[in-house]
Image (tube, helix red, strand yellow):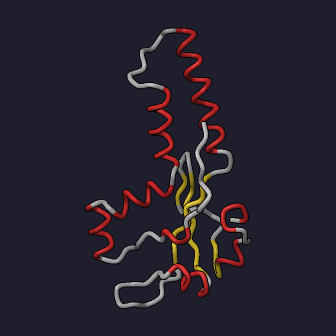
C-alpha cells in the first residue's frame, strides 16, 4: 500500500482483513472497508447511488514482476542452449502476453468489458474501481 498509494493500509481502510480470501501465483485478494474519504474520492456508488465502501482488494505478491522477467530470461537461454523444445512465439511476444497477465489494469479492463461481468454488475455483485488502482506500473524486461 505504501509503495502504491503513498499511505498505510490503516489510512485508506477502516477495516482490512490480513487473511486473504483467495490466493494465486500472482496475487491474493483481501476483504476491506474503505474509509469514507477514499470511497467518496473513488466515486464508488451502488445502483441506487449509495456509497460502497466494502471492497475486494487484489494485492500482487512481492517480487512477482521482477522474478517473472528473470525466469523468462533464464527459460529462453535454456531453450536456446538445449534446442530441446520448439517455442511457437518470440520472447517479445511471450513477454507481452505475460505482462497482460500480471497487469491489474488490463485485467480490470477485460472484466469491465466482458459479457459475464456485465451480468455480475447487473445483479450488483461488484464493480471495478479504476481510480484506486496503482498508478505507477511501468514495464521493463
Where is residue 23? Give x, y as percent.
Answer: 55, 54
Q: Residue at x 55, y 21 (%)?
A: 76
Foreground of the two, 12 or 32: 12
Q: Position of residue 46 (x, y in %)?
A: 39, 84
Compared with 24, 49 (above or below) is below
The image shows residue 2, relative to residue 137, as above or below, that is below
State the residue in front, 10 or 96: 96
In this view, 140 is above or below 138: above
Q: Quadrant of residue 121?
A: bottom left
Q: How many marks?
A: 0
User: Dividing the picture into quarters, in which one does residue 7 lie?
Assistant: bottom right
Q: Residue at x 54, y 86 (%)?
A: 40
137 or 87, nearer to the observer: 137
Relative to 122, is 24 on the left or the right? Answer: right
Q: In which quadrant of the rendered image does the C terminus lie?
A: top right
Q: Residue shown at 62%/58% (left/top)?
A: 136
Q: Quadrant of residue 16?
A: bottom right
Quarter of the rendering occupied by the N terminus: bottom right
How far across and how far down the image is residue 131, in percent? 52, 71
Q: Could you tell whether 90 is left or right of 33 in the image? A: left
Q: Residue at x 65, y 38 (%)?
A: 67
Amino acid at each position: 500500500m505504501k509503495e502504491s498509494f503513498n499511505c498505510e493500509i490503516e489510512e485508506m481502510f477502516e477495516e482490512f482483513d490480513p487473511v486473504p480470501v483467495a490466493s494465486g501465483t500472482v496475487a491474493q485478494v483481501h476483504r476491506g472497508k474503505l474509509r469514507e474519504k477514499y470511497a467518496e474520492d473513488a466515486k464508488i456508488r451502488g445502483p441506487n447511488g449509495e456509497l460502497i465502501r466494502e471492497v475486494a482488494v487484489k494485492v500482487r505478491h512481492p517480487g512477482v514482476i521482477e522474478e517473472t522477467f528473470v525466469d523468462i530470461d533464464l527459460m529462453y537461454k535454456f531453450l536456446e542452449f538445449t534446442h530441446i523444445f520448439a517455442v511457437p512465439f518470440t520472447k517479445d511476444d511471450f513477454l507481452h502476453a505475460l505482462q497482460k497477465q500480471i497487469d491489474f489494469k488490463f485485467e480490470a479492463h477485460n472484466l469491465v468489458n466482458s459479457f459475464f461481468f456485465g451480468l455480475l454488475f447487473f445483479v450488483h455483485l461488484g464493480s471495478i474501481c479504476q481510480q484506486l488502482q496503482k498508478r505507477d506500473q511501468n514495464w521493463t524486461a
